[in-house]
Structure formats: structure tokens, C-alpha cells
Amino acid sequence: MTQDPGLASWLQLTLTPGLGAAAIRGLLKQFGLPENILIATRAQLERAAGPAAAQLLRPEAIAPAIERALRWAQEPGHAIVTLADAAYPRLLLEIPDPPPLLYANGRVELLGRPSLAVVGSRNATAQGARDAEQFAKAFSAAGLTIVSGLALGIDAAAHRGALAAEGSTIAVFGTGVDVIYPRQNAPLAGRIAESGLLLSEFPLGTGGAAHNFPRRNRLISGLAQGCLVVEAALASGSLITARAAAEQGREVFALPGSIHSPLTKGCHALIKQGAKLAESAEDVLAELTSFRRTGFASTSFAADPTAQPEGLLTHMGFDPVDLDSLCARAGLPAERVSAELLRLELDGRIAALPGGLYQRLS
């Protein structure tokens, strides 16, 4: 996209120490474009936004940071999108605290596409990650862009699923867009930069401070028409995203799971509080009334009439079970059951849970 010739003025506003987004929005409301703000007197600035606004009169202190951002924005695939740009996402304008600008790396046009947030636990089970990837792939095939936070577990699985279909994905950072966090997801971030979009409101070089991630979460939900939570403990950051979505007037969905798993208690709590239970992609797509879907792969689970029970799976059911109970059910010694559990786990048929429990996946 063509950069705003007044971009340096926007950067001066957002990079000034002590001048937060709310103060910047107040200045913009009173004076108009940043160029008008920067020619105001010290007294006018302080009346509008407090003492920190007077720092705008000392641009030399942040000149290197402004120059760095301008150089970064000139590189292929990079853009800085301001509130005055046509590319600024319309849905973000509806939230109470839209960021004055966004640093973008990748396909900026995705900001204007219908989207769905998919979030969940960093410590996902194998089944949870599989569900997130399958659902995201179905949504992406239907034409939705998947928004998530590039965290380990459910976020990463959602991004992978979305990259496999047309809708693609947006990864929203709690760091500068040039700081990959966590580092383990650097290869995934590279793939997203090529065919999706990396996005952040934080200045280049910003590290992974804990207080930045709740702010990041409100953008994940704010960019999307709805938010799907796949596996979340009661203290999960994903519930912050879900609450932000509800406060922003977005649809909230949650995948149910075993009553014994701590990673589904957050989802069950959301459902009790009014989130819509989602057992398939169809359940979610049917509720997004302003979105017209294209073709997509169903995620409904149907019984296979030709499938036969196999070995230990016959005795497992779908609730978590311990080794001793399995031995009693199957009438087999612990050594044989342990060996069979290992084989099934390596095959992706079961998952080992905390506390010495095992659970059949599907």
C-alpha cells in the first residue's frame, strides 16, 4: 500500500514517551490530523492531554525511532496503517480503544476481510490442537480469515489450519511486529508473513512484557466478527479474549469437552455464561449472519459404520482413565496395557494427561 506522506507525524505521536493511545485520540479529536497537533502551543497540548503532551515539542528525543520505523515501512511487504488510512480495519473503529496505528507485515488486504478469532490454551492436548487446526481450516475454506495470537498450542494450530485454505490468517503480536514471540514459532511466523499477515500496535523492538498481551487480546477479538475458544483453563488468557469479544458485541463460541479435563473448564464456564456451544464449523458459521460462506469442509463427526473396536480402545470410552482401571477393564497385566498405551499414543489415538490419566482422542 502507498504510505501516508504524513506518517512521520503519526509516528511522532505514538512514539512520544508517556503519551498513551487515549491521550492521542483526545488530541486527534481536538486538533484533527497529527500535523495540526504538532504546531499547537505547549499550553494547548497540556490542556488537551496533560503534561506528557508537551514532550511532542521535543521530537529530537525520538528521531532515531521515527527514522527506524520509516525505513522499516519502506521494505517489501511492510506497512504502517494509521487511523486515517482506508486500509484501517473498520471493525477496530467500533471498539472503545482502537490503536492510532498498526505495524503490518504481509497481506494488508486481509484487514478488510471477514474474520473469526480462534484462541485457546498454550498447553493444548493433542486432540485440542487437532480440533483447532481442523476448525480453522474449515473456516478458512469458507472464506473467513482466522485471527489468533501466535502463541504455542491452540493459537499455532489455528494459524496452521488457516494457512491450508483460502481465507488465510492474521497473527496479532503482544510485541513489536519484528519481535517473534515465542521463538519456537518463528518458522510459522515466516509462513504467515508470506501468505497471511503479522500485526502489532506496539513500536518496533518492543519485547514480550506481560502487560502487553491483554492489550493484544482485545485486538484479536476486535478484528473479528466472532471468537471461538478451543480448550481453556479457568485462569486462561483466552478467557480475557472471550470477555473482550463479548464486551465488543462479538459472538462468542466455545468447544465443549470432558468434564474431567481442566483444559475444558474455561470453555464450559463460557457456555454457562451464554457463549454458544460449537460442535462443528457449521454451528459457528450459521451464527455469523453478516458473513456469506463459500464452500468448506465439514467438521461434523459422524460414526463410521465400517469401523471396528480395536484392542484397548474398546475399554477406554472417552473420559480420562488411569492405568489400574484399564487393567481391570481389559483383564490384562499392567506391562501389556502400558505397552499398548504407548503404541496408541504414538499413533495419535490417545493422549496422556496430567495425573497418570489417558484419554481417547476420537
Image (spheres, rainbow, N blue to C red):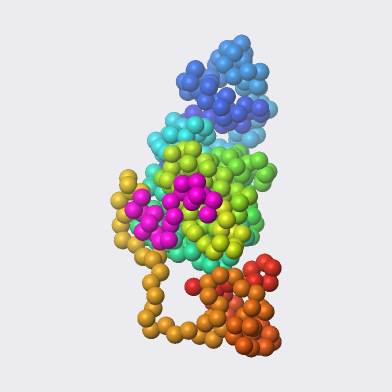
Q: Which residue sits at x=53%, y=67%?
A: 127
Q: Choose top left, top right, bottom left or bottom right for residue 304.
A: bottom left
Magenta stretch?
268-287
Q: Is residue 150 magenta?
A: no
Q: Which residue sits at x=59%, y=70%?
A: 320
Whether residue 114 is visible: yes
Residue 29's x, y, as percent? 48, 21
User: In the displayed structure, would residue 199 be above or below residue 159?
Assistant: above
User: In the displayed structure, would residue 17 be above or below residue 89?
Assistant: above
User: In the displayed structure, would residue 160 be above or below residue 94?
Assistant: below
Residue 223's x, y, as percent? 46, 43
Q: Which residue sits at x=56%, y=50%?
A: 238
Whether residue 171 is visible: no
Instruction: Tell me if 204 is positioned left or right of 293 in this view.
Output: right
* Total marks placed: 0
Instruction: Tell me if 256 is positioned left or right of 325 in this view.
Output: left
Residue 122's x, y, as percent? 61, 57
Front one among 337 and 202? 337
Q: Is residue 272 magenta?
A: yes
Residue 224's x, y, as percent? 44, 45
Q: Which residue sits at x=60%, y=35%?
A: 67
Front one among 310 and 31? 310
Quarter of the image for the N terminus: give it.
Answer: top left
Instruction: Tell me if 153 is positioned left or right of 86 in this view.
Output: right
